[in-house]
């Protein structure tokens, strides 16, 4: 047994034993709130919204006084309102706007639907917070008893954006994965792959080729990335070395840490590339912060990071708070973590050490364990279909695709759904990306049947206003070609699961052009 690996694993077990004390979510969140407000009280934002008074209420007030005042004083922001009034000034180089000091790094993020890039500030405090949470997540491996000590001496392949950031007028910008990879601790460099030189490559296709050529020289135990791109990379490596599985090249690969999208639709095809089972760990790392991660084996969901630079609020995702298009109404109901209920969907609000305040991140989540503060991501506030009351979530779609993939023994690499009109009523048009032979009509019937089982509202509307379901089967490469055409080829980019408004026309025009 390797000495370093043994020391690391024993240290991890000790750390986890200390961390197993009872979780008090509200107490941790109040502490995080105090730290955030205390740090930002002399910023322009803090002075505008009476942070001194909020800090006093958090330190000396009654149990909920600070939160009631926070809701009263600070408005909810989406990206446009936060950027136009505050972050734009930070981007221009002004100091002490929404967080103390000058922001030198901005993560470029456009999610899955918007065409224009968003500029999300990444402060020094946020970089450190992401590193701390990343280390905590690695430490959770001590709870996975099937993992040997030798894992901790293997290579960690992190497939992300370029670490060669764009320098623009006093600041740097790029993918969050590139920003964080450019700041990895010195002690981690010996384990980090693909290494500094390849990590700087901006051409995504060339980066994958360079990793493929180097892969045979690496002893990888741990892989991090978006499922679609990791699967594509593994397929390239298998083809390059003319082997049957990725374990023929990386025999010690034991852990896949994934995030960005649900892994379940990819599992069927992914596991065909393995010689033996590996451990999967889910993470929730957004451009706005490291929000949650799977903290123990067989966890139903991911545990929110309650004590590291983030304060959470939750908006019940229902017709009382959101329009049929997913737009937030004025003065919605907002809750703290001790007010939520298991099994209900919430839109997530963040206040962070990067100067986001009551920020609507756009994701929807559901609590699977309130006691453990464990959640699953269910979709996006605007990435759902409810043309006629079917209330079809991305979570429903993912599960239906997973079930049908298993039934048919096929790998569905990508999919998207468009809501369209059908005579005077409505229809859903599915575009399914698979390289396996499948009958489109059979696929359509199976997806429809599974959704009827999963969603009562969908079942009702299939008998009434939702009159037709159409499935178009496409090669998986078609989806990646569209992303490339839109300049969204890269580690943090995902294909939108729901196409709405202009994206439907753009997608259909693209398909017509490549026929």
Image (cartoon, rainbow, N blue to C red):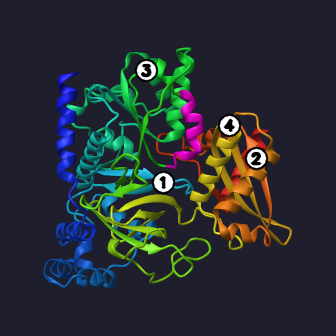
Q: Between label 3 and label 4, give the one nearer the viewer.
A: 4
- Judging by the rendered image, the residue that carries numbered circle 3 is 215
Which segment is the magenta one?
A: 261-273
Determine the CA span between mark 4 and mark 2: 12 Å
Where, quadrant-wise, is the C terminus in this rendering? top right
Say whether disc 3 or disc 1 marks the residue closer to the N-terminus. Answer: 1
Q: Between label 4 and label 2, give the one nearer the viewer.
A: 4
Say whether disc 3 or disc 4 marks the residue closer to the N-terminus. Answer: 3
- Judging by the rendered image, the residue that carries numbered circle 1 is 117
Determine the CA span between mark 2 and mark 1: 36 Å
Q: Position of residue 376 (x, y in %)?
A: 46, 58
Circles 3 and 1: CB distance less than 8 Å? no
Say whether disc 2 or disc 1 marks the residue closer to the N-terminus. Answer: 1
Q: Is residue 190 visible?
A: yes
SS of the residue under disc 1: loop
Residue at 22% across, 82% down: 63
- Judging by the rendered image, the residue that carries numbered circle 2 is 443
Determine the CA span between mark 3 and mark 4: 29 Å
- Judging by the rendered image, the residue that carries numbered circle 4 is 409
Residue at 24% across, 84% down: 65
SS of the residue under disc 3: helix
């Amino acid at each position: 047994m390797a000495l370093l690996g043994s020391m690391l694993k024993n240290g991890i077990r000790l750390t986890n034993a200390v961390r197993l004390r009872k979780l008090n979510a509200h107490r941790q969140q109040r502490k995080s709130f105090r730290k955030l407000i205390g740090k930002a009280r002399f910023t322009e934002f803090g002075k505008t919204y009476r942070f001194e008074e909020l800090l006093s209420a958090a330190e000396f007030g009654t149990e909920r006084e600070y939160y009631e005042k926070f809701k009263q004083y600070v408005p909810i922001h989406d990206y446009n309102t936060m950027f136009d009034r505050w972050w734009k000034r930070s981007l221009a180089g002004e100091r002490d706007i929404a967080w103390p000091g000058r922001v030198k790094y901005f993560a470029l993020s456009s999610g899955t639907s918007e065409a224009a890039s968003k500029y999300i500030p990444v402060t020094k405090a946020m970089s450190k917070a992401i590193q701390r949470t990343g280390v905590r997540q690695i430490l959770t491996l001590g709870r996975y008893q099937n993992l040997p000590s030798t894992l901790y001496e293997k290579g960690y392949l992190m497939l992300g954006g370029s670490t060669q950031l764009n320098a623009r007028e006093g600041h740097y910008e790029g993918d969050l994965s590139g920003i964080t990879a450019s700041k990895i601790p010195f002690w981690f460099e010996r384990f980090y792959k693909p290494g500094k030189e390849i990590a700087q490559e901006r051409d995504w296709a060339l980066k994958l080729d360079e990793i493929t050529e180097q892969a045979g020289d690496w002893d990888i135990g741990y892989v991090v990335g978006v499922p679609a791109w990791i699967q594509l990379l593994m397929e390239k490596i298998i083809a390059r070395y003319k082997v049957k599985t990725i374990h023929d090249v990386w025999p010690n690969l034991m852990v896949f840490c994934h995030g960005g999208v649900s892994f379940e639709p990819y599992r069927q095809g992914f596991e065909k590339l393995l010689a033996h089972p590996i451990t999967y760990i889910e993470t929730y790392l957004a451009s706005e912060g490291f929000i949650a991660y799977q903290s123990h084996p067989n966890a139903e969901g991911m545990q929110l990071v309650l004590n590291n630079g983030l304060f959470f609020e939750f908006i019940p995702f229902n017709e009382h708070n959101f329009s049929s298009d997913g737009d937030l109404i004025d003065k919605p109901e907002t809750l703290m973590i001790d007010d939520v209920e298991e099994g209900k969907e919430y839109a997530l609000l963040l206040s962070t050490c990067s100067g986001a305040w009551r920020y609507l991140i756009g994701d929807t989540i559901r609590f699977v364990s309130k006691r453990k503060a464990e959640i699953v991501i269910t979709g996006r506030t605007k990435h759902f279909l409810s043309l006629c009351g079917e209330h079809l979530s991305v979570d429903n779609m993912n599960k239906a695709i997973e079930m049908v993939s298993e039934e048919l023994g096929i790998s569905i690499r990508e999919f998207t759904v468009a809501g369209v009109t059908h005579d005077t009523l409505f229809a859903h048009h599915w575009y399914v990306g698979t390289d396996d032979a499948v009958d489109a009509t059979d696929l359509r019937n199976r997806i429809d049947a599974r959704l009827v089982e999963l969603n009562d509202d969908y079942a009702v509307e299939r008998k009434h206003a939702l009159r037709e379901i159409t499935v178009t089967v496409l090669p998986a490469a078609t989806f990646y070609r569209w992303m490339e055409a839109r300049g969204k080829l890269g580690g943090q980019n995902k294909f939108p699961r729901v196409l709405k408004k202009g994206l439907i026309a753009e997608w259909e025009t693209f398909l017509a052009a490549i026929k």
